[in-house]
Image (cartoon, rainbow, N blue to C red):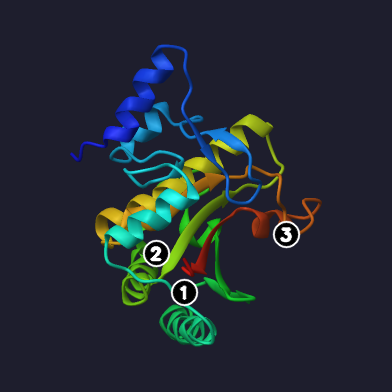
Amino acid sequence: MRSWTALAACILGAAAMSACTTVDPYTGQAVRNNTGTGAIAGALGGAALGYLTNTNRSEQGRKNALIGAGIGALAGAGVGNYMDRQQAELRRELAGSGVEVQRQGDNIVLQMPSDVTFGFDRSDIQPQFYGALDDVARSLNNYPQTLVDIIGHADSTGRADYNQALSERRALAVADYLTNRGGVLRDRLYVAGRGSTQPIASNDTEEGRAKNRRVEIIVRPYTG
């Protein structure tokens, strides 16, 4: 079991009524990086919500970790070409897996519906999906000049606090698989749950709710 100094410090701080925080790269707000993860952290080998870097739990800390790992930043026209090549690889490797590969500007978004990745109301990854995650991990390792955000989502069925915790557990399960089994550098990762707050379809139909129950992996170019 790996010892994560930053997580240990955060737990001790919480015991002293001093909460640890991280900065959400999407909202810019300071949020607790151990929200709802007490038992989850132990089950997932020490993972915590937020930035997984040991050096500095911030966006800049994540970039500093890449510099320390000898990973250089992309620049200029090379950004689009780099992401084009990774997108083509992911589309090829994930064809028929149920994972949707989308392009949003220079970012690549992998939409993983829960009916493919997880059982109903569960956060343990279905064994038949291991191959797809192995392909994702291999691509992330082939293209190390990217930052990786893993975001869990839920539909609006049930209590908001339950949906939030479930979305966090699912995002953490994917992050844990990619780092522990896939060998992806954990310093590249940001992990969060959004509960039911960011639907991509109507929650009034079963089809829409199925689309909203998902984990997104957002692959962003590292530009320094």
Q: Nearer the viewer, residue 100 or 73?
A: 73
Q: Report which residue position mark 3 lands on.
A: 200
Q: Is residue 219 left or right of residue 52?
A: right
**Label 2: few (<14), some (14–19) or many (≥20) C-alpha neighbours in 10 Å:** some
Circle 2/circle 1 CB separation < 8 Å: yes
Q: Nearer the viewer, residue 117 or 49?
A: 49
First in residue order: circle 2 vs circle 3: 2
- Residue 33 at x, y percent in the picture: 48, 35
Q: Secondary structure at mark 1?
A: loop
Depicted 200 relative to depicted 22: above or below: below
Q: Which mark is residue 97?
A: 1
Mark pair 2, 1: CA separation: 8 Å
First in residue order: circle 3 vs circle 1: 1
Q: Report which residue position mark 2 lands on.
A: 129
Q: Secondary structure at mark 2?
A: helix
Amino acid type, callout 1: Ser
Where residue 206 sits, quadrant-wise, is bottom right
